[in-house]
Amino acid sequence: MKKIVFLTFLFSFLLILLTFLNYKIEVIETKIIDTEIINKKLEKDLVFFKSEWEYLNSPENISHLSKKHLHHKPAELIEFQHFIKLLSSERHIDE
């Protein structure tokens, strides 16, 4: 009789343990699924941001934006003698 009670107790304890283990496994599986969903969303966002970055950094777009906002004018080269005169005239003005 003692063996039957002991075996019943052991069997009940193992079933309870398996139930808790199964619950923990289900909780972990749902966390894994949620993490995979978030990961897929982040990968889609990353692809989108990479395409946006490529567009924004394209040479055509940079050229367009610099013409629009920086108002650059073509530079003109001066001869070396004119450069020396310009420097010397600045020195006389500072003194």
Image (cartoon, rainbow, N blue to C red):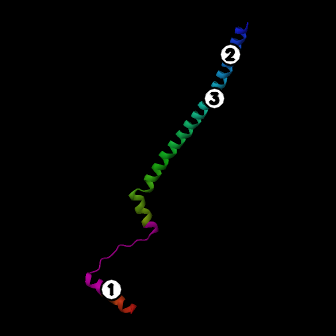
Rendered location of residue 50, percent (x, y):
46, 49
Check the image and name the residue furthest to the front: 2
Assess disc 1: are there few (<14), some (14-19) or many (≥20) residues with their C-alpha within 10 Å of its C-alpha. few
Q: Which residue is mark 2?
A: 10
Residue at 53 percent across and 40 percent down: it is: 39
| SS category of the residue bearing label 2 | helix
Q: Are marks 3 and 1 in contact (CB under 8 Å)?
A: no
Along the line of sight, the residue nearer the viewer: 69 or 39? 39
Q: Quadrant of the N terminus?
A: top right
State the mark number for residue 87: 1
Q: Which portion, as a residue range, is magenta?
A: 67-84
- First in sequence: mark 3 vs mark 1: 3
Q: Quadrant of residue 84?
A: bottom left
Helix, strand or loop for disc 1: helix
Q: Quadrant of residue 11?
A: top right
Residue 54 covered by magenta stretch: no
Q: Nearer the viewer, mark 2 or mark 1?
A: 2
Q: Which residue is mark 3?
A: 24
Image: 75 above or below 24: below
The amino acid type found where label 3 is placed reads: Lys
- Where residue 4 sits: x, y (%)? 71, 8
Please tell me how many numbered marks the rendered image carries: 3
Gap between marks 3 and 2 measured at Cα: 21 Å
- Please state which amino acid type lies under the numbered disc 2: Leu
Q: Is residue 85 left or right of residue 54?
A: left
Q: Crowding at label 2, few (<14), some or many (≥20) Cα neighbours within 10 Å?
A: few
Return the residue found at the far top: 1
- The picture places residue 58, in percent across and down from the top left corner, at 40, 56
Q: Residue at x 49, y 49 (%)?
A: 49
Q: What residue do we see at 36% from left, 92% from top?
A: 92
